[in-house]
Image: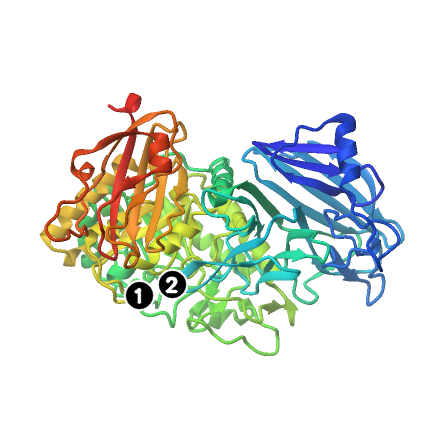
């Protein structure tokens, strides 16, 4: 028996037989050991069912069809149409062999099918954050090639899990939560975009009936892979349920010769009380990365919605000066700076500065930005290429294609084959040269199209290899430039999985900067992505994506709960807007130490028009809550709003943290008195009873600061 514990989560694994080890329990610690632990494992073996094989069929880490499992198989493959029936036997167990410092406990199980000359190694880890994760490595030990079609792993969840929460979405409307009953059958979310995808489920969660942000028992998984992938829940007629994941391999994508090995993605699992409970584990895990930035997260100005492709040096110098004047700390020059890039139809792949637009190059702009006290960053889309580019014309073989034709263009571009050594070097060397020439501290790394019919070498599927090559390129750049920060952008939020976040210092949540849409996008994206990694910007008064108009206060209060930036032509802002923006940025800087280290909490408010989220210091001494009206309310005024996550026994001061210009007054009556005077209350009172908030017009927000008495300055 093996017990792996991280934080307050426990995995119990039975590896006493020669079969594939099975997970007996995943959840809170059970306090079992010795004979009691073994007896519990024995008692968990299911009864033989009618019309089934003549021995119990327990769930194993790799679902084992050779023992009678009738759900999705763990491993699917063959040798030229035969040798498909793999039966693995346990031959070795390595205890605590992980090299990741975030691992609290690990086991490595080695299994073999001697008849078919297949070896499989399972890694299973409990992490200090309370996350668990598993992956496998499959090796061919025969001279005959082995074609791998699928490698699935998963975790069991108990029968009391009754509902599914996952996410859908599209470009400019990512992270849209959806729920349904967990019924018998396979409930699968497949991503076939060659990237994580706008419609990818950030997590796939199941829980007890009616679970919410702060209540109910929840189990969730993510397939940590930036290419094609599947995440699924499978419930059988006997109630047994598995949460699993896999890389979706295209035909012939992995063919193993003798000694070759395939490594699956990590499948991460999170268990906790409510959605906030599972979310905290993902945040703690990412914040414990060896490369996690603990310095203050700079306020960014990104030039895209300010100038688009209209790069005029004088205008951008002026924009940089305006940015510094309101308190911006990082100035990022977006798309349009390189050869032939006057529109999205040309230039990708030609990563040299366009001297027709920038006759003196970008060094003068970079120096001007730094002279104003800001860092300088630059946009790239390294994995793509326009057919209308010098690079594509000179090297047509660099374009991923099935061999006999090109895929359809998307955004007038194709995919650059990073597995081609020459193409890889072309991109890497261009980035390295510009980082060194311009003193770049930041790269916005974009990826604007799906991988459709992505092949190479005369038609061999290439999504797996392209994903591995991307990781290699990012790792190489980080090794060469340890202080260089990289933002993961993929038409907005289409690449936000845990594996790319191991290599990213910021993640762009959406190309939609409309504050109304961003309230929901940022709320749900933050289930896995902590605020300091989630880029959210203040746009112009009229949102470019939707044409909605919002007050600056609402745009600012929406963006500042994440990693604040600006995407607005400040040269067109009025003096009053500039002054108000300067005040909001100063406020953000005064609270970002809290926002970017705190526990993120959300409230299960019965009125769907109210979105409540907060950042509560880990010691419960300080908190900032955002309450946004994302529609017209069920009640007016809306009543009391709970402020979760506080210390029940402590006494807190509650006060308005910022002006709010969306407050509604009825018949001349005043708003709740405490809003102007403040109040004192226990954490229990604020969490259970909540506070009465002023009525809000749609698309308005309030900020509330809650400070423990002994922590007040």
> Residue at point 24% right, 23% down?
713
Q: Nearer the viewer, residue 366 or 219?
A: 219
Query: Residue 686, relative to residue 250: is it above or below?
Result: above
Mark 2 Cα-neighbour bin, 10 Å: few <14, some 14–19, many ≥20: many
> Residue at point 62% right, 50% down?
265
- The first of marks 1 and 2 along the sequence is 2
Question: From this viewpoint, which residue is outermost toward the bottom?
Answer: 405
Query: Residue 199, relative to residue 638: is it above or below?
Result: below
Q: Are marks 1 and 2 in contact (CB under 8 Å)?
A: yes
Considering the numbered disc 2 on the image, is that residue within a helix, a strand or a loop? loop
Q: Nearer the viewer, residue 170 or 388?
A: 170
Any part of residue 513 in sight: no
Q: Which residue is mark 2?
A: 172
In the rendered structure, find residue 545 and report the number of the disc placed on it: 1
Coordinates of residue 41 in the picture (x, y in percent): 76, 37
Query: Residue 444, relative to residue 584: is it above or below?
Result: below
> Residue at point 72% right, 40% down?
24
Any part of residue 702 in sight: yes
Q: Is residue 422 left or right of residue 319?
A: right
Mark 1 Cα-neighbour bin, 10 Å: few <14, some 14–19, many ≥20: few
């Amino acid at each position: 028996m093996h017990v792996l514990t991280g934080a307050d989560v426990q995995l119990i694994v039975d590896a006493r037989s020669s079969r594939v080890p099975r997970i007996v329990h995943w959840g809170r610690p059970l306090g079992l050991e010795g004979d009691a632990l073994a007896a519990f494992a024995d008692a968990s073996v299911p009864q033989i069912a009618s019309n089934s094989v003549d021995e119990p069929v327990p769930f194993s880490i790799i679902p084992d069809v050779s023992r009678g499992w009738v759900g999705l198989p763990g491993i699917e493959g063959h040798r030229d149409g035969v040798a498909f029936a793999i039966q693995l036997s346990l031959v070795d167990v390595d205890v605590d062999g992980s090299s990741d410092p975030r691992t609290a406990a690990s086991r490595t199980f080695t299994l073999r099918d001697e008849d078919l000359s297949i070896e499989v190694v399972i890694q299973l880890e409990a992490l200090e954050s309370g996350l668990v994760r598993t992956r496998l490595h499959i090796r061919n030990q025969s001279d005959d090639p082995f074609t791998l079609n699928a490698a699935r792993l998963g975790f069991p969840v108990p029968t009391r899990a009754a509902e599914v929460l996952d996410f859908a979405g599209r470009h400019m409307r990512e992270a849209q939560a959806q729920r349904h009953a967990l019924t018998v059958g396979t409930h699968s979310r497949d991503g076939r975009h060659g990237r994580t995808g706008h419609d990818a489920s950030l997590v796939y969660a199941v829980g007890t009936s009616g679970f919410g942000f702060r209540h109910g028992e929840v189990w969730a998984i993510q397939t940590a892979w930036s290419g094609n992938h599947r995440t699924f829940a499978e419930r059988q007629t006997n109630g047994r349920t598995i949460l699993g994941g896999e890389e979706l391999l295209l035909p012939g994508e992995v063919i193993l010769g003798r000694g070759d090995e395939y490594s699956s993605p990590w499948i991460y699992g999170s268990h906790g009380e409510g959605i906030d409970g599972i979310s905290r584990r993902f945040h703690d895990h990412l914040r414990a990365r060896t490369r996690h930035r603990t310095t203050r997260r700079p306020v960014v100005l990104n030039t895209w919605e300010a100038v688009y492709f209209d790069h005029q040096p004088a205008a951008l110098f002026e924009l940089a000066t305006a940015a510094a004047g309101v308190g911006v700390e990082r100035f990022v020059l977006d798309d349009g700076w390189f050869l032939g890039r006057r529109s999205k139809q040309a230039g990708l792949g030609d990563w040299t500065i366009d001297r027709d637009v920038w006759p003196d190059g970008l060094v003068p702009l970079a120096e001007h930005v730094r002279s104003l006290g800001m860092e300088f960053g630059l946009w790239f889309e390294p994995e793509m290429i326009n057919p209308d580019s010098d690079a594509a014309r000179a090297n047509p073989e660099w374009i991923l294609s099935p061999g006999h034709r090109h895929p359809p263009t998307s955004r007038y571009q194709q995919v650059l084959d990073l597995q081609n050594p020459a193409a890889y070097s072309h991109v890497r060397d261009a980035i390295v040269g510009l980082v060194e020439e311009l003193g770049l501290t930041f790269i916005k790394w974009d990826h604007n199209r799906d991988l459709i019919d992505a092949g190479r070498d005369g038609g061999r599927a290439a999504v797996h290899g392209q994903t591995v090559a991307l990781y290699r390129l990012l790792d190489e750049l980080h090794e060469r430039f340890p202080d260089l920060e990289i933002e993961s952008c993929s038409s907005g939020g289409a690449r936000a999985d845990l594996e790319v976040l191991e290599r990213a210092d910021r993640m762009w949540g959406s190309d939609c900067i409309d504050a109304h849409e961003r309230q929901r996008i940022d709320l749900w994206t933050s289930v896995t992505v902590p605020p300091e990694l989630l880029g959210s910007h203040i746009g112009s008064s009229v949102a470019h994506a939707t044409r909605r108009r919002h007050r600056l206060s609402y745009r600012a209060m929406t963006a500042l709960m994440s990693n604040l930036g600006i995407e607005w032509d400040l040269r067109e802002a009025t003096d009053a807007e500039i002054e108000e923006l300067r005040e909001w940025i100063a406020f953000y800087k005064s609270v970002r130490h809290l926002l970017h280290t705190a526990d993120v909490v959300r409230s299960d408010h019965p009125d769907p028009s109210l979105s409540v989220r907060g950042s509560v210091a880990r010691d419960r001494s300080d908190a900032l809550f955002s309450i946004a009206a994302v529609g017209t309310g069920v009640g007016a005024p809306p009543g009391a709003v709970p402020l979760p996550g506080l210390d029940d026994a402590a006494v807190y001061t509650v006060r308005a943290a910022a002006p709010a210009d969306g407050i509604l007054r009825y018949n001349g009556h005043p708003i709740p008195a405490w809003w102007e005077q403040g109040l004192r209350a226990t954490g229990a009172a604020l969490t259970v009873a909540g506070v009465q908030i002023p009525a809000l017009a749609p698309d308005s927000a309030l900020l509330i600061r809650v400070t423990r008495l002994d922590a007040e300055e």
